[in-house]
Image (cartoon, grey):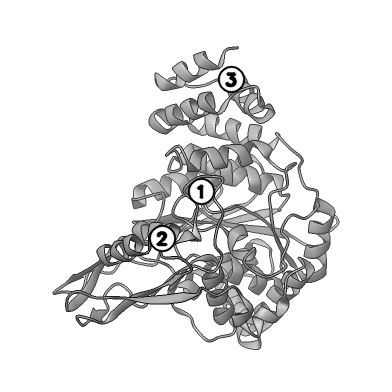
Amino acid sequence: MLMQEIILKKRNGQVLATEEINFFVSGYTSGAIPDYQASALLMAIWFSQMDERETADLTRAITDSGEIIDLSAIEGVKIDKHSTGGVADTTTLITAPLVAACGGQVAKISGRGLGHTGGTVDKLESIPGLNMALTMNDFVRVVSDCGVAIVSQSPNLVPADKRLYALRDVTGTVDNVALISSSIMSKKLASGADAIVLDVKYGSGAFMQSLEEARKLAAMMAAIGERAGKPTTVLITDMNQPLGRAVGNALEVEEAIRVLRGETGGDLLTVALALAAEMLVAARLAEDLNEAEARLQAALDAGGGLRRLQCMIELLGGDPRIGDDPSLLPRAAETVPIRAAATGYVSCIDTAGIGHAAQLLGAGRATKDDAIDPAVGLKMQVRLGDSVEEGEELGRLFINRRENFERAADMVRECVAVADQPPPMSPLIHDRIRSGGG
């Protein structure tokens, strides 16, 4: 079997056989297939797409490229949650500890930033001392001890995805239904959870730009979950503006802490609670969403979510005091306000552009080998529909160096459009899709 023939076959729009997909995944994982050939096939897949069977085969091949975690030693239904990626989306740091506070067992393998989106691993690694590279035995121990563990992929867990994930980031092949589905679902299947809840983002800050594309992705992942015998629920949520106000690793951790402390809320909390409610129902810890929402609100009010987050941080070697004093997180040397050039209503926010501005400051990666500065980023002061006056603060940059500062500032100004009338507002949560068609 020749790799160039597989590339040509997919480039010409043909369907790949199971054996060809297995050959590619195993060969790339072992290093027998070089990056340039893998990049060519990824681009061919991006243009020609994959059908449900091909995508399921790709998911299974990636899953089988490494070890499968056995969570049977943990009592109860093990539940996992994942987002397709957005800007200021820190829901995992809110949902996972809240579900644990309600008796859930949350076992989550997370990734790093991809393109303009932030990664949960990068966010958590901004916490002093925290180590996310656990052995699988330690992963199981942390879940058993405090009901939640969020760790990074080990070299032995879906190694094919780890390599492909980084390559997609730098080859313009991120936003493809088959590649996103197989990447996400391979990690979910390999991590051993019994049920899966997914958040598919759509809009200007998401990889899926349209609601139709988001529904295709949601349906594909639900179908993969059904084929694998894992009950899967997918929410489709809006990403036409940053979900929270903070964009940047330590800044987002601080915002999640303030949500769990009951000091702030907004859209970030709304989506986090909706996902957490689905997780409780999937774990059979609540009869329906109404009961789940009531239990979660009680846990939030009592501080149970924050205590679970602090427990996990401590077991991962981090400083749990950040829950009481977020100033212990890395701090930028300088903050600079970005001001409105006109009076009117915030009519549009280029959310991906906001993410790229934070990336320019050092909060994200341009290449897979780039280092991240955990302290930098930005905070948005305005939301869609807000009225603003000329000279009013739209947001604030948090910087450690002046390199790219002016370009990032200009980008933020250009990303926030001001008009005479407020825009029509779309729903925050658009749809729910369950495996089996529910």
**Is residue 65 positioned above or below 200 on the image?**
above
Q: Does dot 1 land on a helix, a strand or a loop?
A: loop
Residue 303 position by quadrant: bottom right
Indicate the position of residue 427 as horizontal and vertical percent values.
35, 67
Q: Nearer the viewer, mark 1 or mark 3?
A: 3
Q: Which mark is drawn over residue 20?
A: 3
How far, Cα to Cα, is label 1 from label 3?
30 Å
Left or right of residue 139: residue 20: left
Which residue was labeled with disc 1? 437
The local crowd at label 1, few if under 14, some if 14 to 19, many if 20 or more residues have their Cα within 10 Å, is few
**Mark 3 or 2, nearer chain start:** 3
Residue 387 position by quadrant: bottom left
Residue 130 shows up from this direction:
yes
Q: Which mark is drawn over residue 403?
A: 2
The local crowd at label 2, few if under 14, some if 14 to 19, many if 20 or more residues have their Cα within 10 Å, is few
**Mark 2 or 1, nearer chain start:** 2
**Mark 1 or 3, nearer chain start:** 3
How far, Cα to Cα, is label 2 from label 1?
50 Å
**Is residue 322 positioned above or below 185 on the image?**
below
Name which residue type carries label 2: Glu
How many numbered badges does the structure rendering display?
Answer: 3
Left or right of residue 102: residue 113: left
Q: Residue at x 59, y 78 (%)?
A: 257
Indicate the position of residue 322 as horizontal and vertical percent values.
66, 79
Q: Which mark is drawn over residue 184?
A: none
